[in-house]
Amino acid sequence: MSGAPPRSAYAVRDLVWRLGPEFTLDIPALELPAGRTTALLGRSASGKSTLLSLLGRVEGSYFERAPDLSGEVWLDLGGERLELLALSERELLKRRLRGPRLGFVFQREGLFPGLSPVDNIVWPLTSAGVKPAEARDRARTMLERVRLPESRNVSTLSGGERKRLGLARALAFDPGVLLLDEPLTGLDPEALGGLLDLLAELTADPERTTVIVTHQREDVERLADHVVFMDRGRVAADGSRDAMAERLARFFLGEVPNAAPPAPPGAPGAPGAP
Amino acid sequence: MSPTSGVAAFGREARFLGAVLARATRALPRMRPSDYVTQLGRVALSALPLVGIAALFAGMVIALQTSLQLARLGMEHMVADIVSVSLVRELAPVFTALLMAGKAGAGLASELGMVTLSGQAQAMRAMSLDIDRELIAPRVWACISGTVLLTVSAILLGLIGGMILGAAKLGISPVHYLNRAVDALAPVDFACGLLKAGGFGVIIASLGVAFGLKDKADAGVLGRHTMSAVVVASFLVLVSDHVFTTLIVATLG
């Protein structure tokens, strides 16, 4: 983790999303290093999951582009650079970007209750063109890795088991970019240890970029190379984990870094200022 | 909901209505026939007893009311003619559509509402699963064709209802009743009724799907969206009935 600064997997530019009178996501510039793991930290409702949803292009409604959303989110897939916000839902589907290349694990898992755990994993894989036999093999391997029996009915899974299935489903694609929204909360200590080991192994791959939203110190210590602190929709501080060591220590003692207030209209750097 | 707020809601939802129909049409070649058949069973077959029994009783009551008025003119023998034409052109499509708005429209909005609320729709997007093909197209086409098919059964059962009333109360023999009913009907009557049924199906399906897949924060919103799907669809069925009828009469005579 030393030497030349790494290439950026994500570059966010002038991102503004007004989500109501109380909350605006406002990120003038942010870079997330490629091949590394970035932890998004901050209070609840500071915009971490909102930012993550934009990085994965699963934000807002299916029928229309989110209103009051502007700016650019560039994704560098190594050889291909895409501005994600410019892609329509149909273009995203055509490119099969989400799933095979951009894995997303949701806080609310979004499991398919009518399907078995194996089929929850197999359906997205076969839809993306993986042969059924191979998809089943991959599904079984993933379920084994997250220690979930195949025979269970999805509607009878406990909260922790649902988390594990959600994780297994996203990981089955072996995506180059992994976006995790609190993947390890609500797990029993035994499952947590196993999954943390699994995530540590997956995120150690220098070809894989991971962004994880978390509140847990252990996730940051085991997984993160880079840290972004968020506060009220803005980035309060970001940098390598080593550079942020002191802030991290204070953060886990309850001292959350505050973002600078937005520049008043007309001030240099403010939107619309000359 | 007052008519004014119904019109305002229509304005807001009109673009979703168009968006759903466009998506369902584009996804039609990709749709799996088995998905369509499954949805048709859920939409049409499950509503058949409801629509059938309602149509049977509607046919009887219309025959009764019509015969009372015709009796004053001494023209009771015309009852079959009037009942059959009004059933085919107007009552069966509108009755069926209103029942379908309550059953299929609410069913679509609540089922897809749960898919949205539980995060399945978002997960489908995140894994490049084709929502148009998997969720929208089979439901929309099943609802449209289901409304037309149920209208046909409502016409048949409504005619039988009239026939029963005619035999029991007015002493008209069933064969005579049916002969008169069939003679009174022209192909244009069926075209008028079934085209309207298709149009109503479009309204019910599009609104059910659009309200179902709308972003929702909690189960309270799901309930409100489901109610709106039914109220706006019922309102639009009654308003568009006049528009469709005017257009069809102007075109087909």
Image: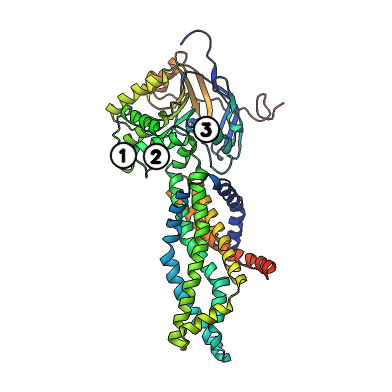
Tell me where residue B10 appears, x and y as whole percent.
Answer: 60, 56
Question: Residue B36, labelled with which disc?
Answer: none
Question: Residue A111, labelled with which disc?
Answer: 2
**Residue highlighted by disc 1:** A157
Tell me where residue B204 appears, x and y as whole percent.
Answer: 53, 58
Name the residue at 47% across, 61% down. B102
| Above or below A116: residue B198 | below
Whichever of callouts 3 and 1 sits on the residue coming sooner in the sequence is: 3
Q: Residue furthest top?
A: A3
Which element carries disc 3, helix, strand or loop? loop
Residue flagged by tag 3: what amino acid is it? Answer: Arg
> Does residue B145 appear in the picture of this structure?
yes
Tell me where residue B96 appears, x and y as whole percent.
Answer: 50, 66
From the viewer's perspective, is the residue at label 3 or at label 1 nearer? 3
> Does residue B221 appear in the picture of this structure?
no
Name the residue at 51% across, 51% down. B209
